[in-house]
Image (cartoon, rainbow, N blue to C red):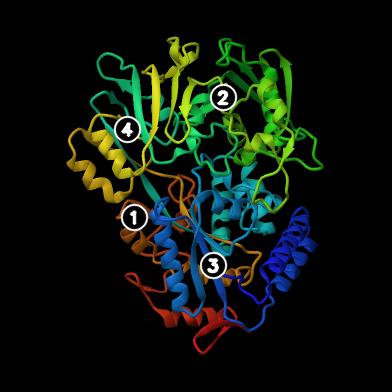
Amino acid sequence: MGLPNSRSADESGRLDRRRRAILAGLAGTASVASAGCVQQVRSIANRESSEQVSLEVKTVPADTDPRAVKIARVVTNRLSAVGVDAQVTLMDEQELLRDVLINNDFDVYVARHPAYDDPDFLRSLLHSQFVAESGWQNPFGFTDLDVDESLEAQRRTSGSERFERLAELQRTVARQQPFAVVAFPDDLWAVRTDRYSGWERFGLGRPLGYLALEADGDSPERLETVVTDGRVTANLNPIASAFRNRGTFTGLLYDPLGRNRGDGVEPWLAADWTWRDESDGGPTATVRLRDDARWHDGRRVTAADVAFTYEFLADTSLGREDSSVPAPRFRGRISLVERVRRVDEQTVEFDFVASDPAVAVRAFTVPVLPEREWRDKSSSTGVAGIEVGDRTTEALVWDNPTPTGSGPLRFQEKTVGERVVFSRFEDHFLHDGDADAAGLGADFAELDVRVVPSADAALNFLEAGRADAASSAIEPRLVPTVARRDGLDLVAETSRSFYHLGFNVQRPPLGNPRFRRNVARLLDKEAIVADVFDGYAVPAVNPLAVTEWSSPDLAWGDEDPVVPFFGDDGELDAEQAREAFRDAGYQYDDGDLVNR
């Protein structure tokens, strides 16, 4: 399907990139004058001929994520019902993420956003500073100076003051709708409980989920899991994350300075850290490494490795390019760090941007990398299919075939497309009886991750005793199957990874917030939770809905409090929706929605 205007695809692509560059330049200026310029650019971008409004909704195929496809089809069916020329385009997941996160080549997409650990993730998702960057850095091209101010303010505060700042931010974003939150799904995993227990402590979506397991009886030699996504057998690069969400297994190979064990970020690879406030800027932290921290090859983890890691993640080109090439996955966390200094062999000092230590501590959760292996990955390289920026480095595309980390598991062997095996790193502090380990450690000698073709095949492996767990989440339709099969159990938790509609606000008519709100109102989120998720999800209006940071006035009641559905009980009131589009400045021509 062509773009929603009469221009050629190549010409429109050039114009879209030009608009993106213009907006990126404007985004760095926080003056009142810049707000007027941005509005002027938006007005120009939204001038279109009186043709039918046309939208392409991109998502992944059903065998990758059937829920995303179903949501996308609901969206296009409802758009068609109100006179929009709409169609679904199914794409390979990597192709979709490349179009959305790198090339900015989309109208609307349906996807699941990666899970987050702190509301500060919204800064990289929405701040105008990131409008021209790749990854989950403002893929919508959204620019709003009030939002920028709120995003900055929430970093500098804590407690009730931060809560109020975040509440204000949530209300503004809900009104503007640069993306429409649909639902937070329950993550569901199938496991056996005859050899291991403790599956429910952290779930299987985080590295700690495997380190919290306890072997029943004699410690088994091997923990066997199955996955339906074979990428873990091909790529073990912890920072090549445009196509990796959580990094569960790489999180077992690479240690961060700190981990969130449930009550906030606590020292991990670090022995401890101390904070002091600087009156002329952000806080400073002195971090001391553990004496027993070792890389998998036996060498010591040093302060030089830590300082290099933060420099490298901020700019994987190490200054070789005209502008920095940051690691997209950790962009939000790294942006908290202003400078890192090596004090001695085991001590590092961090200077942070203006922020509260409770927020700044997020920066300690990135994986620490061995300098000797990663420094020479700073050279630029090209990637087929990437059109915007044309800048990346080897570090971001390298598959890291034999990784050397400092985590509790080490790489042992792999067969691409079939399996990967990790073994317990005996020199890790979790395995030496450390009192601070809090019951964590690899209670197995090996972790064998095997690729299977489907979730149904995964359950067959479990029932036959050939695997202990399905590490890929299963669909709700399989829950009754798990209940019926002997020896299987279900592990469930509400995810912070939400399904959403993303809007390219740099393309007409999506630059109009009233238009975006009307599109959001075409969805009955409660009906979607019932029909698409079989009830294993919660409908939501904002991305913090399942956290303690959610604003009370945005809580879900009988309907969406900001963008209520045009209809009742899943049935669209098309005439009500059409009237709302008319009120937003559009008109109808023989049933087709057109621009004036």
Identify residue type, mark 1: Phe
Using the numbered discs, state the Cα–Cα distance from disc 1 to disc 2 in whole angstroms. Answer: 37 Å
Residue 48 locus on image (x, y percent)? 67, 78
- Nearer to the camera, 418 or 34: 418
Q: Secondary structure at mark 4?
A: strand
Q: Nearer the viewer, mark 2 or mark 4?
A: 2
- Image height of 578 relative to 570, above or below: below
Q: Which residue is mark 3?
A: 56
Q: Which residue is mark 1?
A: 533
Side of 218 where 324 appears, left or right? right
Residue at the spot x=66%, y=23% of the render? Answer: 373
- Image height of 444 relative to 123, above or below: above
Q: Are marks 3 and 2 in contact (CB under 8 Å)?
A: no
Using the numbered discs, state the Cα–Cα distance from disc 3 to disc 2 in whole angstroms. Answer: 40 Å
Q: Nearer the viewer, mark 3 or mark 1?
A: 3
Quadrant containing the N terminus in the rendered view: bottom right
